[in-house]
Image: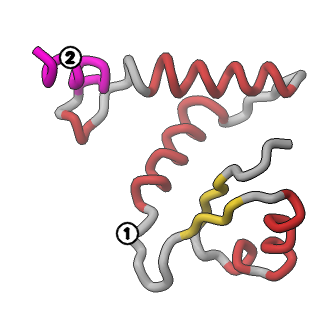
Amino acid sequence: MPKGVAVHSDRGSQYCSAVYQKLFLKHQLICSMSKRGDCYDDAAMESWNHSFKAEASHGERFLTHAEAISHVFEYIEVYYNRKRLHSKLGYISPEAFEAKKVA
């Protein structure tokens, strides 16, 4: 298992619990969560998590860890960052947005 990986969540009681936090220490993970009372603090991450779940991982079953890693890489690096239309960018892909900025 990789060490030093940031795991993001909201401030749900299950994520703030001592048992859950001990798992972070045991596995040398970094806990990332929103600030108390700031519902917009993690809005960007929550939006990305929703997109990932709805578009790439909902109901998927992987036979191996390598297959899961490949699937996640394909979604992020090929589809999400290059082809998917993003409302924040005027409904163009990040790749097209970057190309417009460079041109």
Question: Of the residues shown, which amino acid type is indicated by label 1?
Answer: Tyr
Q: Is residue 18 above or below residue 96?
A: below
Tell me the residue that label 2 is attached to.
99
Q: Is residue 72 above or below residue 99?
A: below
- Quadrant holding the N terminus: top right
Q: Is residue 15 above or below residue 63?
A: below
- Quadrant holding the C terminus: top left
Q: With 43 as the anchor, is 31 left or right in this view? A: right
Residue in the picture at 44% in, 50% down: 47
Question: Of the residues shown, which amino acid type is indicated by label 2?
Answer: Ala
Q: Residues within 10 Å of mark 1 (few under 14, many from 20)?
A: few
Tell me the residue that label 1 is attached to.
40
Q: What SS does tag 1 mark?
A: loop
Which region is colored magenta? 92-103
Residue 25 appears at what percent x and percent y? 83, 67
Which label number is shown at residue 63? none
Nearer the camera: disc 2 or disc 1: 2
